Every structure is written in C-alpha cells, then in structure tokens.
Amino acid sequence: MKRTLLIVGIIVVLGVGLGPWAYRTFRDQGDLIALPAFDYRTNDSWAALPPEMPPAVWAEGWAVDVILVGPDDGLAPRSQTQISSQTDRAVEQSKRLSESLSVIGPVYAPLYREANAATDLSAALKFYLDDHNRGRAFVIATDHPLPPEMLAPILDDESLRERFGGFLRLTRARGDDALFSSIAGLENTASNFLAYCPPQYAEAETCQPVVEIGRQDGMMIVSQDEPIAGDNLTGYKEWLEANVAKTAEPLGALEEVEIIDIRRPGETDPKPEASEN
C-alpha cells in the first residue's frame, strides 16, 4: 500500500513539474508556418553581417570574406513564438562562430527557410555577390551539405571560381565517421569537387578542409586553434595577387545629357526667307 502511494506521489509531482513544459512544448507542434521569402537587402534577413561594408578589391587589394551557413540558421517554426525564438538563437549562434571565423575575414550568415533552402540560399549568395563582394575572394563555411543550386554561379563563372577559396566543413571532433560532403548529392571524394575547387588547390588533398567545432553554453563554437582551415588558406592572398586579375572599379551610371545647338553671343535663329510674289 505504501509503495503504491509512493508511486502515485511521484507521478503527481512529475505531473505538476512537467505539465507546463509539456503543454508549452506540444501545444506548438502544429504544422510549419509558411514564412515569406527573405529580402536579403534588409539586415534582419541575416544572422550575421559585417558592421560596415568591407573595402573593395580595387581599393585595398585582396581580402577574404566568409559565407556562413551554420547551425540553426535554417528556420522551421510551428508558431509565432518559435519564429522569434529560432531567429534569436540563429543570431546568437552565428555570433559565436563569427568570433573565430572573423580571423579569416568578415562573416555573412543568411537566415533561410529550411523548407526552401535551395531558393533562399541561392538568393542570399546572389545578393552578396552583386552588392557586397566587390571583387573580393570568399569561402563558404557550413555544418551540413549545401544545395547545388546555391553553388551554381561558382560553376558558371570562371572568374568567380578563381576567387572562391573552397569550403570550410564545421565538424564535431568525432573522427572520420562524422565527415560529410559540403555539397548535397555528391559523394565525398576529392575528384567530385574538382569543378568547384579553385586552381590553387590543384595539389591539395581537398578544398573542403575540416574546421573542428565543439559546444559551449549550448552553442557551437570553433574548438581548434588557428590557423583555421590549415594550409588551405595559408598564402591564399599571395596566390591571388600572383595569379588572378583584380576586378576593376565599375563605371558610374551614365547620366542622360540633353544635346543643344551652340551659338555665338548675339546669334539668333535665322529668319525665314521672304516668299517671292
């Protein structure tokens, strides 16, 4: 009898303690909210952005940016409350990783809809290339395989591929079993990445070196010592300087100019000749 009462008491205590948590948790487990597409022209569509526009290659020479597609940047909310919660976590997570990755260069981390990753990440990279890149080199850091659609511009544009420094695989230190391909659908072999790899990696084992990450306060952080990406980025700027032509500063927009006749002072329109009678 006493044992039965003890068990009942434990159940009651657990029910009182876990009831509110269970209600909040399972109440929100409805269908995913159909989020609108992100507008990457606005700062709130990014989990991380540099505080100011980095200098263009034609202004201060070669530099490297980091495109981060990391943990928690893909949103899949089931309630209005989760939208804010997931966004806040993505911003904090990207901030933690950016603290280490910024030794490479300024960090750009787009938010995206997990269900529309290919569309959103393609749009984010396009906006970065059109409006922020300005001839700079860049690398892509990720903790999971990326959609090939996002990376299509690298395959289509040889000059862009020359400025692409490869992938940084954010990987927990668990050994080779945890390694993944940086591109969804591709077998994780060096030969499959030749089309994406820049020429300076011709003699390297891979253009997707591992960056070891760990966990701190519930967030992922870079856990390895510098240099990040090992030898792959060592001397990269020097290689660019020796082998890749810098993008020229674009001309400003041409203004429409009205063309008028030029007359000397005192000149007027010629008078029409008098008609003969």
Image (spheres, helix red, strand yellow):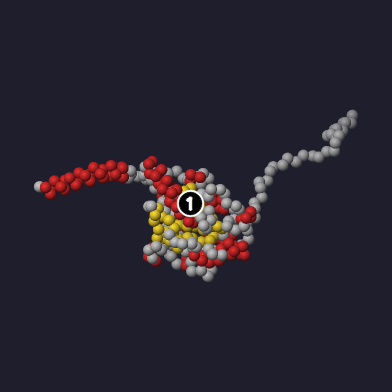
Task: Write the residue at 45% across / 43% down.
Answer: 36
Q: On the picture, is 92 further left or further right than 242?
A: left
The residue to which callout 1 is attached is 109
Most distant residue in the top direction: 277
Q: Position of residue 50 (x, y in %)?
A: 53, 50
Between 97 and 270, the one nearer to me in the picture: 97
Q: Residue furthest bottom?
A: 203
Q: Would you identify the image quadrant in which residue 18 lies?
A: top left
Q: Nearer the viewer, residue 136 or 1?
A: 1
Quadrant (top left/top right/bottom left/bottom right) for the C terminus = top right
Q: Position of residue 176 (x, y in %)?
A: 39, 66
Residue at x 38%, y 52% (from the top left corner): 217
Q: Residue furthest left?
A: 1
Q: In percent of the image, x 33 and y 43: which residue is there? A: 28
Image quarter for residue 258? Answer: top right
For residue 98, side relative to residue 259 (left or right): left
Query: Residue 142, position in %: x, y?
Result: 45, 57
